[in-house]
Image (spheres, rainbow, N blue to C red):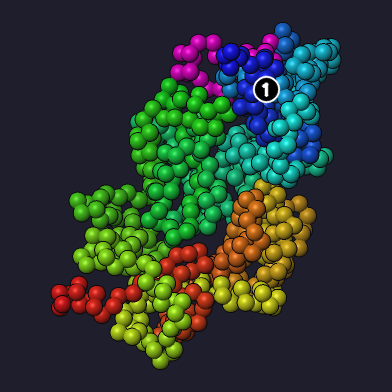
Amino acid sequence: MGKVKTLREDVYKKIAAGEVVERPLSVVKELVENSLDAGADNIKIEISDGGKQLIKITDNGSGFDPEDIEPAFKNHSTSKISELSDFDTLTSLGFRGEALPSILEVAKIEVASSDNNDGRGLHCVFAEGEIIQKQEIAFSRGTSILVKDLFYNFPVRKKFLKAERTELNQIISFLEPVALVHYDKSFELVHNHKTVFVYQKTTSLKDRVYQVFGKDFLESLQEVDFAENNYRIGGLVSKLNTGISVKKHQYFFVNRRSIREKTLIAALNNTFEKFLERSRYPIGILTLAIPPHEVDVNIHPMKLEIKFENASAVYQAVKHGIESSFGVKEEFAADGEIIAHPGVSAAYGSRYGSPGRFPGSGYRKQEWQPGHPGLEAQEPYGDHRQTQLFSGSFPDEEDFSIIGQYKNSYILVEKNNDLLLVDQHNAQERINFDQLKKEYQEEQVVSISPLFPVIMELSPSEAAGLDDRKIELLGKIGFRLEALGGNTYDIKAFPQVLGEKNIKEAIRTVIHMNVDSKEDEADFEDQVLAEVACKSAIKVNHKLFPDQMKTIVKNLFNTGNPYFCPHKRPIIVEFTQEQIEKLLKRK
Ligand code: ADP
Ligand code: MG
């Protein structure tokens, strides 16, 4: 007998619904998008238990025509498109007509709505996929949809829901970018009857960024406003000499739809690459307006992804848009060197010392070029040094001498006839890390109070990310945070090794560290210590006196691993005498 059977309707409907509704976040996303599509400019989101028990979204949009409420909960019912060709002019967020029926498949729903200004509204109760109650009520124009007991009839899904806090964090992380790009609407989020945020309507993205992330954050950004071909690129990106140490805070919007898309991610990060130090990333809140027929928004069941018809043109336009905000334009000469236009050295000047330090050719990330004669086989970061490392043959003070400093960034050392190039930043990171770790293990971290009050205002998602575990760990490494109410903290003490000017950034970095993946505690602690060590380390492009260089090199050789910093980046590049002689054709 054949084995292929048609699935029962109740089974396949749940499977299909499961593609749209994965967790509370999905419900919030679909309902908020519907409110926006309905033209609302005031949206309130109330949830309980991370959305697992209850989600209620109330808007002041167009409301449902009383005749539309029931059909809207049937599969493939939408007011937004009717023909495939409608995609060419689509401006709404929804179009699949799947959200409401999918949510109804896995939860209980109540709708109150009114499409008039006379206060006449309708209240409907749905359960088991059917409408079970319908009555007229007094209601002002707009819609309120209540979703209860998510996955009450879908235990497999219910089992996979995470802790309340995690579900809530996901919802906040979704709402933040939506609130950014819809700065002209007000949003309110309430969790377990407590207000998480209220963003009043504003008139610019900048004002909304200020509301969400605060003054420090906004001050680190500059505006982008640029047009090329049919594209308009706007928003805010990091100023040249800033960036942050986590790849968070990169938001992309295409026709006001929040998405992650590889072309845009690459355009942002690649454009900044040569302007930022290693392991720092640009902040970007980038908006792209593009003719709807040039994007396919229908390639993902949750509409999280899109596809551009001409990705390379989009890439170029975004890159040029970002560059225009720097006042920098570059051309690549035939040999691949960057030729900087006059604006560039001034821009570098502020960051890398006096203008003109890097003449003509501009600054490039210093990397070992595989094309260099004689260096290919050398594997500068190869394993040979590891072997040395663990054979325990580090030189004493007498075993090395300092030759000097190259580019105010690398210390040149002669040791046992070898030439060493020591990256001063990475070296100090290793030294600080080892010191901090020792103090930490002995529970003797040296902690001091800041000279001037350090007040930190966290965004709602940052505040949510500052959980008990992180507060405890911050405490153990020498931070003392006093809550001043709301999301504001007074930093009363910090680890001495960090330095006062790095306090806020170190705390932010710890907050943004992803600890969902349940890596073991020790690893998490090491990561936090590494971040603090990194923030406190001297930067490249910093002149050192011979004594300082000597101390760094000596301390480096006394650490647990002088060859790699705690972020696993190399610290030392070595040339043997033989290699140098070969390069100079003496052998
Ligand atoms: P889609 O958004 O893809 O059209 P949905 O299932 O999300 O599909 O919604 C079905 C229809 O219900 C929408 O096309 C819209 O006409 C109506 N609708 C949904 N939410 C609202 C709302 N908050 N206000 C007014 N109309 C709504
Ligand atoms: Mg929808």
Q: Is residue 84 magenta?
A: yes
Residue 359, percent from left and from top: 27, 64
In the displayed structure, does residue 200 sit left or right of residue 259?
Answer: right
Q: Is residue 175 above or below residue 151?
A: below
Q: Is residue 286 left or right of residue 44?
A: left
Tell me the quarter of the image containing the N terminus: top right
Residue annotated with mark 1 = 14
Say what amino acid the circle numbered 1 marks.
Answer: Lys
The answer as to whether callout 1 falls within 8 Å of ligand 1 is no
Displayed quadrant of residue 202: top right
Picture quarter with the C terminus: bottom left
- In depth, the one of 120 and 49 nearer the eye is 49
Residue sitting at x 76%, y 35%: 52
Q: Which residues are magenta?
A: 71-93
Residue at 51% over, 20% down = 90
Q: Residue furthest bottom?
A: 398
* Rendered location of residue 316, percent (x, y): 35, 39
| Picture residue at 48% right of the left edge, 30% below the top | 306
Is residue 408 inside the magenta stretch?
A: no
- Residue 421: which quarter of the image? bottom left
Whether residue 189 is visible: no
Above or below, 466 against 535 in this view is above
Q: Is residue 125 found left or right of 101 in the rendered image?
A: right
Direction front: furthest residue: 1
Please tell me whether the stretch drawn in magenta is mainly helix, strand or loop: loop
Looking at the image, residue 537 lies above or below residue 334: below
